[in-house]
C-alpha cells in the first residue's frame, strides 16, 4: 500500500470515528482552507482551480446549514442559518465582483465559529450528556465521507 492510500485511509478512519462536534470543527477547518485556496487561485488567475476550491467551500457551508436542527438548536440554529446564508451569498457575490476582501471576511467568520465550537467541545457537560456520535447527523456524515473533506 502506498503512502497516499494509507493517508487517505487514515483520514477516512479519523472522520468515521469523530464525534459530532469534531466533525463540525473539521468542516469549518476545511471550508476555511478551501476559501483561502480559492483566493490564492484567484490571485494567480487560475480560475478553474479557484472555482473548484470555492465550490468545495460552498458545499461544506451548505451541508453545515442542512445539518442544523432548529427544533433542538432553537435561536442558535436560527442564527447559524443566517450566518451560513450570509456566507454563501457573500462568497458568490465576491466571486462575481472579484472582491478578494470578502474571501478574507468569510474565512474570519468561519474561524470565529470554529473557535466557538472548539470551546464548546472542551466544556464539561451536565451528567448524562456526552459529546458523542448520537448528535452526528446524516448530513454531517455525508459532508465528511461522501464530500471528501478529509481529502
Image (cartoon, rainbow, N blue to C red):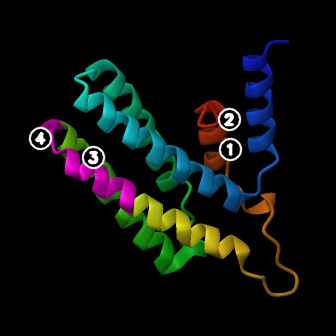
**What is the C-alpha distance between the residues marked 2 and 1?**
6 Å
Tell which circle, 2 or 3, labels the residue nearer the N-terminal end: 3
Residue 85 appears left or right of 113? left
- What residue lies at 56% left-to-right and 49% top-to-bottom? 27
Q: Are marks 2 and 3 in contact (CB under 8 Å)?
A: no
Work out whether 84 lies above or below 80: above
**What is the C-alpha distance between the residues marked 4 and 2?**
33 Å
SS assignment at label 4: helix
The quadrant holding residue 53 is top left
Residue 90 appears left or right of 30? left
SS assignment at label 2: helix
Percent across and percent down for residue 22 are: 69, 57
Residue occupied by mark 4: 97
Work out whether 121 lies above or below 140: below
Residue occupied by mark 1: 141
The residue most toward the top is 1
Tell which circle, 4 or 1, labels the residue nearer the N-terminal end: 4
Residue 133 drawn in magenta: no
Check disc 1: other Cα within 10 Å, few if <14, some if 14-19, many if 20+. some
Percent across and percent down for residue 45 are: 22, 23
Percent across and percent down for residue 105 are: 29, 58
Magenta part of the protein: which range?
96-108
Residue occupied by mark 2: 145
Amino acid at each position: 500500500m502506498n503512502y497516499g492510500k494509507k493517508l487517505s485511509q487514515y483520514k477516512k478512519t479519523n472522520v468515521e470515528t469523530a464525534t459530532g462536534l469534531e466533525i463540525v470543527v473539521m468542516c469549518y477547518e476545511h471550508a476555511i482552507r478551501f476559501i483561502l485556496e480559492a483566493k490564492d487561485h484567484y490571485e494567480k488567475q487560475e480560475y478553474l482551480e479557484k472555482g473548484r476550491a470555492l465550490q468545495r467551500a460552498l458545499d461544506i457551508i451548505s451541508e453545515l446549514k442542512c445539518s442544523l436542527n432548529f427544533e433542538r438548536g432553537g435561536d442558535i440554529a436560527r442564527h447559524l442559518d443566517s450566518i451560513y446564508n450570509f456566507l454563501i451569498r457573500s462568497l458568490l457575490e465576491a466571486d462575481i465582483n472579484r472582491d478578494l476582501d470578502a474571501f478574507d471576511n468569510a474565512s474570519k467568520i468561519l474561524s470565529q465559529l470554529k473557535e466557538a465550537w472548539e470551546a464548546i467541545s472542551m466544556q464539561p457537560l451536565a451528567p448524562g450528556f456526552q459529546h458523542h456520535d448520537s448528535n452526528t447527523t446524516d448530513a454531517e456524515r455525508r459532508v465528511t465521507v461522501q464530500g471528501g473533506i478529509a481529502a
